[in-house]
Amino acid sequence: MLFLVNKLRDIRLQTGMSVSELARRSGTTRQTITNIELHGQEPGVKLALQIAQALNKDAKDIFFDDFVIQGLQKGFV
């Protein structure tokens, strides 16, 4: 079981990037980005990595909670 969180919208807004620009840079559509940000759609691994690259971030910083990552590293999750 994965414990995903979605910080995409917050991170995108921090970078000043529009939905359209993020979609273009990550090779997807505006609708897909909107669905991920607002409707909880979970991106596949490939798209998550493309989005992270477009934002110059690590995918775990966008889609995983720090508490869960620490638990995984310690073998608790």
Image (spheres, rainbow, N blue to C red):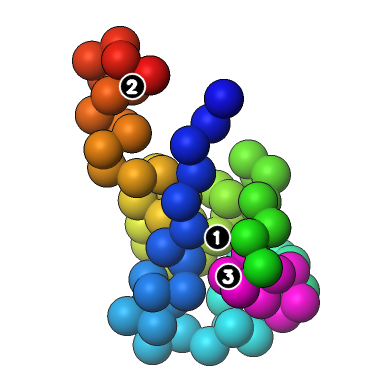
- The residue identified by callout 2 is 72
Q: CA distance from mark 2 to mark 3?
A: 24 Å
Give the mark, 1 or 2, whose residue is nearer the N terminus.
Answer: 1
* Residue 31 part of the magenta segment: yes
Which is nearer the eye, 11 or 74? 74
Is disc 1 in contact with disc 2, using a CB cutoff of under 8 Å? no
Q: Quadrant of the N terminus?
A: top right
Left or right: 39, with 53 as reference point? right
Q: Earlier in the sequence, mark 2 or mark 3?
A: 3
Residue 55 to residue 42: above or below? below
- Percent from the top left, x then y, of residue 17? 46, 84
Residue 12 marker: none
Q: Residue 10, image x and y in percent?
A: 39, 74
Image side of residue 57 versus residue 6, left or right? left
Which is more N-terminal, label 3 or label 1? 3
For disc 2, the neighbor class at 10 Å (few under 14, some 14 to 19, many from 20) is: few
Q: Quadrant of the C terminus?
A: top left
Q: Which residue is under mark 1?
A: 51
Tell me the residue at 28%/24% (across/down). Answer: 71
Please report the bounds of the magenta region as a residue range: 30-38
Q: Which of the labelled discs sits on residue 37, or is there none?
A: 3
Kind of residue indicated by mark 1: Ile
| Count of numbered circles on the image | 3
Callout 2: SS: helix
Residue type beneath disc 2: Leu
Expressed as whole percent of the image width and height from the top left, the position of residue 4 reads: 50, 44
Please give the name of the residue rendered at 32% of the width and 80% of the height, measured from the top-left corner.
Answer: 14
Residue 70 image offset from top left, x and y in percent? 24, 29
Distance between mark 1 and mark 3 Cα atoms: 12 Å
Residue 68 belongs to the span the image colors magenta: no
